[in-house]
Image (cartoon, coloured by chain):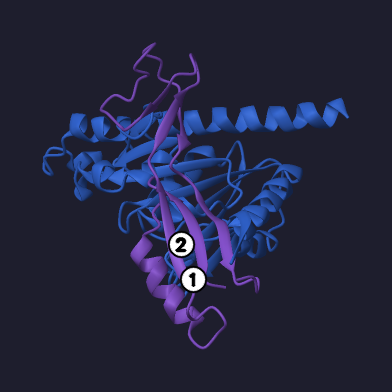
Chain colours: A purple, B blue
Amino acid sequence: MTAITLVIGDLTSIVDDSVQFYFQIMTKDTVLEDAVLQFKRIAPEFVCKACGQLFSGRHIGMNCPRCGGKSIIADKGQEFYIESIEVDDGAD
Amino acid sequence: MGRIEIRRNILEANETLACRNREFFKANGVLVVNVMAAPGAGKTSTILKTIEVLKDRYACAVIEGDMASRIDADVMAERGIPVEQINTGNMCHLDANMIMQASGKFTFDTPTILFIENVGNLVCPSEFSLGEDLNIVIASTTEGHDKPYKYPSIYLRADAVLINKTDLLEAMEFDRKMFCDGVAAVKPMPPMFEISCRTGTGLDGWAQWLSAECERKFAQSRGKVAGR
């Protein structure tokens, strides 16, 4: 395996450098030793439950910018998953 | 070189166990309250005082999470509260597996409120589901009013926020508005209760809200049982 792509939302407490640091420790002397971690960060996005408006960023008050509704949930930014791995399949 | 799509949640194992916990608690008529706060905010005191108010209406039990010691569990046990202590060693949070093992040691009366006192920490506990019904964040006036700005992720998960040590509010020059604006910048304002475990101020309002949440959950469970 040569590369692993991780998707991490900015609303999580996961830090790229820490993941990288421990990945290196854990993979030493294994088949993953030389694998490269690639990080995709996802910016927070919110959705208004009342009108469906999507918006990004945080602001004081956190009301919907379209209808003023207060029922807002985070739509993006809480991801923490392995998107894909790249492996040597023997093809040139 | 071949690219293989994976798209699997890295905390999937924990999520699966949290779902199992949730089913276990539902089947046993247990409402689970995950209490998160910084060290010294008053998690243990708040749980004790809340149980004092609610003990005639609900059976209560506690899971204590600390890196080391049984200090909090002993306090609970002295008062006759069923308690399990989890020592996490060097881990900074509780996870679903720890809760699964600890909760299996109780005999739950129905209905029960199970308080889980998470490890004192404003970062990692927010990442790990335990199978809880409610996430409560306790802030305290002694920590200062800027914490929601510095540790937003824990407030993102809060179903209710408590501000403890309000008897010291003036002495600590705690800026209530700045604190509330900080919480509201993370999510729509959750229910907020200003309490003092030392003087007892505000505990009734908080306990009333919690018991309303209990009634809602237990009514749903009863409804489902009756509908079968």
Q: Earlier in the sequence, mark 1 or mark 2?
A: 1
Q: Name the image quarter holding residue B95.
A: bottom right
The residue at the point 60 percent across, 58 percent down is: B14
Residue B105 percent coordinates (x, y):
68, 63
Residue at the limit of the structure toward the bottom, as seen here: A29
Left or right: A24 in relation to B221: left
Do the residues indicated by labels 1 and 2 lie within the same chain of the protein?
A: yes
The residue at the point 29 percent across, 24 percent down is: A61
Whether the residues at callouts 1 and 2 have beta carbons within 8 Å, the answer is: yes
Most foreground residue, B19 or B84:
B19
Residue assigned mark 1: B88
- Residue B115 in sight: yes
Residue at the limit of the structure toward the front, as seen here: A92
Amino acid type of the residue that numbered disc 2 sits on in the rendered structure = His
Left or right: B56 in relation to B17: left
Left or right: B109 in relation to B71: right
The residue at the point 38 percent across, 73 percent down is: A21
Q: Does B70 appear above or below B215? A: below
The residue at the point 42 percent across, 57 percent down is: A39
Q: At numbered mark 2, what does the secondary structure look like: helix, strand or loop?
A: loop
Q: At numbered mark 1, what does the secondary structure look like: helix, strand or loop?
A: loop
The C terminus of chain B lies in quadrant: top right
Q: Does A19 appear above or below B171? A: below
Q: Label 2: how many residues lie within 10 Å, few (<14), some (14-19) or many (20+)?
A: many
Residue assigned mark 2: B93
